[in-house]
Image (cartoon, grey):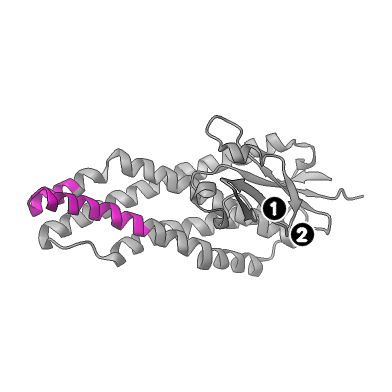
């Protein structure tokens, strides 16, 4: 068997080198999404600050949802299309209809749920600022100014980065595994590759190099629970396995004569 990720010359590239190549590309997507998410969060905070100054009312949910939707839905389509196409094109002609269905499936299940959670957290953070101001006896203008001051703060910057890293790797691994399923032979396997640095979760370091069948689940032990995950970033692993995870997949197919 040989590991497969990229179209050309991948059969002689080691798993670690494949990881570094993929991670380099993931970093570029993360950087772009971090910038877009930070701009979006800043825009949301400033808009709500202005609205609160005028009305003294809590933010409307649909305003936040729509802004985050616009950024992430576009991003999901781009990254899944990119990595689905790349893995698929190794051995087989691209199927645009199937590609569109896979993107739609991700958005309707995983993507939409992630967007709801990100929007919910954003509302919660803004409400905390408002509630804290009310408890302290701050005026409407003072509370509105506090919201605006937080728009460009370190919390929003850090949050934008976390969202970008988590969403990039989730969508990237999803596109890869869905493509691999369409070209897999009965003996094909997928292999978990971890970052292996001082920021890597200890239980993910232990997963490094573990291989299972394309349609099988990885068993990821954590605090006495064996999480069954289709891939790194699989929501079935819960926040402890997903948030900020940089693990990636490579695939092992039988050598062709």
Name the residue at 63% across, 48% down.
220
**Magenta-highlighted residues:** 119-146
SS state under label 1: helix
- Check residue 141 for magenta coloring: yes
The image shows residue 100 at horizontal and vertical percentages of 59, 67
SS state under label 2: helix
User: Relative to the observer, which residue lies in front, 51 or 214?
Assistant: 214
Q: Which residue is mark 1?
A: 87
Q: How many marks?
A: 2
Q: Are discs 2 and 1 less than 8 Å apart at CB? A: yes
* Res. 12 image quadrant: top right
Secondary structure that dominates the magenta span = helix
The image shows residue 198 at horizontal and vertical percentages of 54, 29
Circle number at residue 183: 2
The image shows residue 255 at horizontal and vertical percentages of 87, 48
- For marks 2 and 1, the one nearer the N-term is 1
């Amino acid at each position: 068997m040989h590991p497969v990720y990229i179209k050309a010359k991948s059969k002689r590239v080691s798993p670690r080198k494949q990881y570094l190549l993929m991670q380099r590309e993931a970093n570029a997507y993360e950087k772009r999404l971090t910038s877009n998410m930070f701009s979006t969060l800043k825009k949301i905070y400033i808009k709500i600050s202005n609205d609160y100054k005028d009305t003294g009312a809590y933010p409307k949910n649909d305003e936040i949802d729509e802004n985050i939707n616009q950024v992430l839905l576009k991003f999901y389509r781009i990254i899944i299309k990119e990595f689905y196409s790349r893995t698929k094109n190794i051995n087989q002609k691209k199927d645009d209809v199937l590609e569109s269905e896979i993107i739609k499936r991700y958005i309707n299940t995983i993507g939409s749920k992630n967007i709801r959670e990100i929007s919910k957290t954003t509302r919660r953070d803004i409400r905390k600022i408002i509630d804290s101001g009310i408890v302290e006896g701050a005026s409407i203008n003072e509370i509105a100014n506090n919201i605006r001051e937080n728009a460009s703060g370190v919390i929003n910057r850090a949050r934008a980065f976390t969202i970008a890293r988590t969403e990039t790797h989730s969508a990237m691994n999803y596109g890869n595994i869905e493509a691999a399923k369409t070209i897999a032979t009965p003996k094909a396997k997928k292999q978990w590759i971890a970052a292996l640095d001082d920021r890597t979760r200890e239980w993910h370091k232990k997963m490094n190099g573990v291989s299972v069948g394309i349609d099988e689940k990885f068993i990821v032990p954590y605090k006495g629970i064996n999480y069954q995950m289709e891939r790194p970033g699989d929501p079935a692993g819960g926040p402890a396995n997903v948030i900020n995870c940089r693990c990636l997949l490579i695939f092992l197919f039988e050598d062709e004569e």
